[in-house]
Amino acid sequence: MTLVGLLFAGGCALHDPALRSPAPGTPLPPDYAWPPREFAAGTLPAPPAELAKTAWVPTAPPPAAANAWAREAPAPPAPPPMNTGDCLSRLSAGGVRFDMLDATRGVVTPIQVKSELGGIRYVPLGGLGLVVDCRFALTLMQLGPMLRELGVSALHYSGAYVYRMSAKGRLSLHANGLAIDVHEVTVGGEQLSVKKAFVKGLGDSCESNFPPLNRVACHLKRSHVFKEMLTPDYNADHHDHFHLAIAPSAT
């Protein structure tokens, strides 16, 4: 199976005209390995000061019984396994259905996910299936229980695997099948747009009375499994989506 037909300008690529396809033969990182690199909270660059902030005043925490997403933070997921050899078997043991794909440029273990991951539905906004590296699918599966505790039932994405370079001239993690751009999140049965429902300028707080998407973003960052977890607070290119990506190698 070839994925040339899957390449499209989605997610981050929609906002960055400088993105371009790499020349054939672009080398991949020689130390591509498991697990994803862990980053301490607060290490992502601060958003530009000139970004507009949405006016918002905290309200009293709603009753937990009426709003499941308002409960206190669940514990972060367990660290991923230390090797790639059992990735496919772990996905199968977790009840994930997937198709193995033919050699896919940039991806070590390419698969197309055909079911939920950890009880979370991944819904394509452009009609394309979820093509990722097995390790990224395993990471998302392990995040499922935490997301369900927050009332999340579905993540609606524009793109995952896209072979391209980043604006900085390096191979994008999308090209390794290790990233996804999420534009909408279904929380408590309500489908919320990142562009409209995420409130900028609140910081990385997981307070129970914060807006649902801010709390989801906060807990995703606190899971410490992502190398890149970018929100509308990061820059204008991410004004309408969350960018989630794991590292291609351990450190």
Image (cartoon, rainbow, N blue to C red):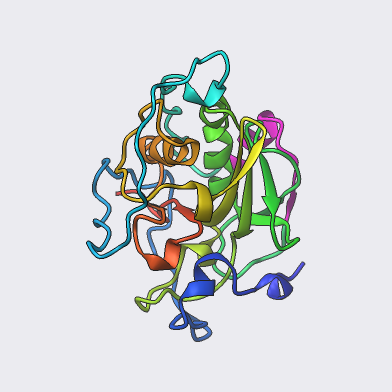
**Residue 233 location (% of width, % of height):** 35, 55
Q: In the displayed image of the protein, which residue is found farthest to the bottom?
A: 23
Q: Is residue 195 above or below residue 62?
A: below
Please say whether residue 89 is one of the residues in the magenta stretch: yes
Q: Is residue 175 above or below residue 209?
A: below
Q: Is residue 42 left or right of residue 113?
A: left
Give the number of marks: 0
Q: Position of residue 82 (x, y in %)?
A: 43, 37
Closer-to-camera residue (182/135):
182
Q: Quadrant of residue 72?
A: top left
Res. 150 visible in picture: yes
Taking depth in this image into account, of 146 and 165 the one nearest to the observer is: 146
Q: Which percent across, then down, holds residue 183?
A: 57, 54
- Please indicate whether residue 135 sits to the left or right of residue 190 in the image: left
Tell me where the magenta segment starts and ends, as one range.
86-100
Residue plotted at (73% across, 57% down): 129
Q: Position of residue 67 (x, y in %)?
A: 55, 22
Q: Is residue 86 visible?
A: no
Which image quadrant for residue 49? bottom left
Q: Quadrant of the N terminus?
A: bottom right
Against 128, residue 144 (above or below) is: above
